[in-house]
Image: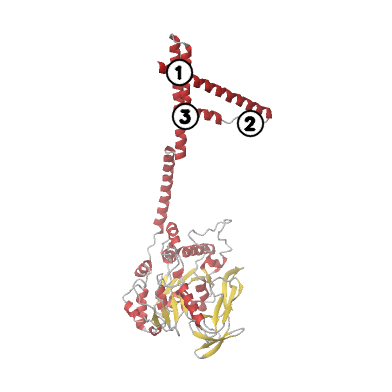
């Protein structure tokens, strides 16, 4: 787009997606738009604290009260725990424009939650709020852990995590402003080759492999690494090699300060090299990415040699902002402040921390683990003369996410079908309930092991009881028939006793069941003593009966043998 077209798009009230390759001046246009419209109430935010700090804003999570993770929709019910109240929405209601920078790092559940909160603020306001998102999806992606993928699928979010995969992105109907003029680099061939990497064209691997060197020059270059561990090791090894006493430069904090945005302490030595992380807006002695060497460490400043000139560098204020409404006045309030030196050890830096920075010389370690990382690292350098690679590139290092590639190929559009997803979830719920009902009916038919054993025991007891009753009836009929005959009565009694003995042997559980039956509790001691005496008598009686039964059984057995 031309300069006049860009200005015309910003002058309109339509929502904007400001994008473009690295170094095209996206942040510059945002700052210019805010400076030219002082009467508008702006809320500026970003997914990370560092990105928000660079633009003088706050994090998305604080502005929109976003939980982690944000799989559920925001609640506005009164009295409900965790609900967003109307007083919390006041800054958003009074805002005219909401700017979200570094949109590529905003995860889809976070973005969806934020837009739903904005929609609620719009309903209360009775007017639309302009939304401007800025970033390049070819650069740093959102963080999606493996443990989150299953939950994201259940919640209806794409596992890629990109904001444009949501129905809320589609509802914003963004006007796309793509910046094409690269201002960081001047070499046309280098710009074209970088753009190929950005859109997933890996035919230029040999072009970048010409910058591979076995002995990289670290003296005037910064090493850009894929991991914190690699960057920390390089910095520590370098610091150990420098002679001189070690000094710890601690940050000063006031008010509400976010953790991890600015280093709490910077460990340096006299003679070590540093790289500046901010611009000197007062004196213009250094800018973001300038190298220097520490000459002296004083009480209130650090003397740094920058291109042969010694400059006293003082701590800078990094302000934390929040938005509030008092009465009908919208205010951007400073809620915290971190005071720290605007430099760090100038030997190694991570790709994430290099985002938004420019270096004249860089040694790049191409071992990366996420899409867009290597493109960010390569595009930090102003010219190919300052580029050094520690090893050759391969196609698997130049990663472009397939979802992002599809998004670019379709002209910054993504096919989102939230209605179908909602129908599927409803059907699965109905099916699951019917299955549960079926399971409950089948479980009633098929008992568990414990119930099966209990029922089996009951059936065996019943069958044993039936057998015993059958035997008793048989013995009774036998005795009656024999009593009618001439045989003496003693033989019948002997036979019945043997039958009874056989029954008791087959069903020993009947005795146990009679013993185990709980007796009624009696409070007096006399009843308990009487019970003991009766139980003793019963035991004696049973022993006598058993002895007589044994004797009769022996006699019957002997007579049967003689017969």
The span from disc 3 to disc 1 (Cα, nearest Å) is 29 Å
**The residue positioned farthest toward the bottom in the image shown:** 308
Q: Earlier in the sequence, mark 1 or mark 2?
A: 2
> Where residue 435 appears, x then y in whole percent?
41, 45
Q: Is residue 278 above or below residue 536?
A: below
- Give SS at disc 1: helix
- Give SS at disc 3: helix
**Camera-side residue of 482 and 359:** 482
The span from disc 3 to disc 2 (Cα, nearest Å) is 28 Å
Residue where numbered disc 3 is placed: 461
Q: What residue sits 46% from the left and 22% below the top?
A: 469
> Where residue 112 appears, x then y in whole percent?
47, 63
Question: Mark 1 or mark 2, which is nearer to you?
Answer: 1
Label 1 environment density (alpha carbons within 10 Å; few <14, some 14–19, many ≥20): some
Rendered image quadrant of residue 439: top left
> Where residue 249 appears, x then y in whole percent?
58, 79
Question: Mark 3 or mark 1, which is nearer to you?
Answer: 1
**Camera-side residue of 228 and 431:** 228
Residue where numbered disc 2 is placed: 521
* Quadrant occupied by the C terminus: top left
Rendered image quadrant of residue 436: top left
- Give SS at disc 2: loop
Q: Is residue 4 above or below residue 66?
A: below
Q: Earlier in the sequence, mark 3 or mark 1?
A: 3
Protein image colouring: secondary structure
Label 2 environment density (alpha carbons within 10 Å; few <14, some 14–19, many ≥20): few
The span from disc 1 to disc 2 (Cα, nearest Å) is 45 Å
Residue where numbered disc 1 is placed: 556
Examine the rendering and report whether any part of residue 177 can be seen: no
Q: Earlier in the sequence, mark 3 or mark 2?
A: 3
Q: What residue sits 41% from the left and 42% below the top?
A: 438
495 horizontally vs 89: left or right: left
């Amino acid at each position: 787009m031309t300069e006049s077209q860009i200005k015309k798009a910003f002058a309109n009230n339509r929502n904007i997606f400001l994008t473009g390759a690295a170094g095209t001046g996206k942040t510059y246009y945002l700052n210019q738009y805010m400076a030219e419209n002082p009467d508008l109430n702006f809320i500026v935010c970003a997914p990370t604290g560092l990105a928000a700090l660079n633009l003088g804003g706050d994090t998305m999570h604080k502005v929109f009260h976003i939980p982690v993770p944000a799989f559920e929709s925001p609640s506005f019910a009164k009295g409900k725990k965790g609900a967003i109240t109307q007083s919390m929405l006041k800054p958003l209601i009074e805002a005219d424009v909401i700017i979200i920078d570094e949109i590529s790092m905003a995860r889809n559940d976070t973005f969806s939650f934020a837009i739903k909160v904005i929609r609620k603020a719009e309903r209360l306001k009775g007017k639309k709020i302009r939304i401007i998102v800025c970033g390049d999806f070819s650069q740093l992606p959102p963080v999606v852990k493996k443990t989150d993928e299953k939950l994201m699928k259940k919640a209806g979010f794409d596992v890629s995590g990109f904001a444009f995969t949501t129905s809320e992105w589609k509802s914003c109907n963004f006007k796309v402003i793509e910046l094409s003029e690269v201002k960081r680099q001047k070499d046309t061939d280098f710009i074209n080759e970088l753009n190929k990497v950005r859109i997933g064209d890996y035919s230029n691997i040999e072009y970048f492999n010409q910058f591979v060197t076995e002995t990289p020059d670290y003296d005037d270059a910064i090493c850009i690494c894929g991991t914190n561990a690699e960057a920390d090791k390089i910095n520590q090894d370098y610091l150990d090699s420098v002679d001189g006493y070690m000094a710890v430069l601690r940050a000063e904090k006031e008010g509400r300060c976010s953790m991890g945005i600015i280093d709490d302490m910077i460990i340096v030595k006299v003679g070590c090299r540093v790289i500046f992380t901010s611009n000197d807006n007062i004196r213009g002695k250094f800018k973001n990415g300038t190298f220097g060497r520490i000459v002296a460490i004083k009480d209130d400043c650090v003397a740094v040699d920058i291109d042969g000139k010694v400059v006293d560098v003082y701590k800078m204020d990094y302000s934390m902002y929040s938005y509030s409404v008092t009465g009908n006045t919208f205010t951007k309030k400073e809620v915290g402040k971190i005071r720290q030196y605007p430099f760090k050890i100038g030997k190694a830096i991570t790709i994430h921390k290099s985002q938004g920075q420019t270096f004249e010389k860089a040694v790049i370690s191409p071992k990366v683990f996420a899409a867009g990382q290597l493109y960010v690292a390569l595009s930090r350098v102003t010219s190919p003369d300052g580029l050094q690679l520690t090893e050759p590139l391969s196609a698997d290092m130049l990663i472009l996410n397939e979802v992002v590639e599809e998004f670019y190929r379709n002209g910054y559009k993504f096919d989102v079908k939230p209605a179908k997803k909602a129908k599927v979830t409803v059907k699965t719920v109905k099916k699951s309930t019917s299955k549960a009902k079926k399971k409950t009916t089948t479980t009633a038919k098929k008992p568990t092991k414990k119930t099966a054993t209990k029922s089996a025991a009951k059936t065996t007891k019943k069958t044993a009881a039936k057998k015993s009753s059958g035997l008793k009836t048989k013995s009774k009929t036998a005795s009656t028939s024999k009593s009618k005959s001439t045989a003496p009565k003693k033989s019948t009694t002997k036979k019945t006793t043997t039958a009874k003995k056989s029954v008791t042997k087959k069903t020993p559980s009947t005795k146990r069941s009679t013993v185990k039956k709980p007796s009624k509790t009696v409070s007096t001691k006399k009843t308990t003593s009487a019970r003991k005496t009766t139980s003793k008598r019963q035991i004696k009686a049973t022993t006598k009966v058993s002895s007589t039964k044994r004797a009769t059984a022996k006699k019957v057995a002997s007579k049967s043998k003689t017969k």
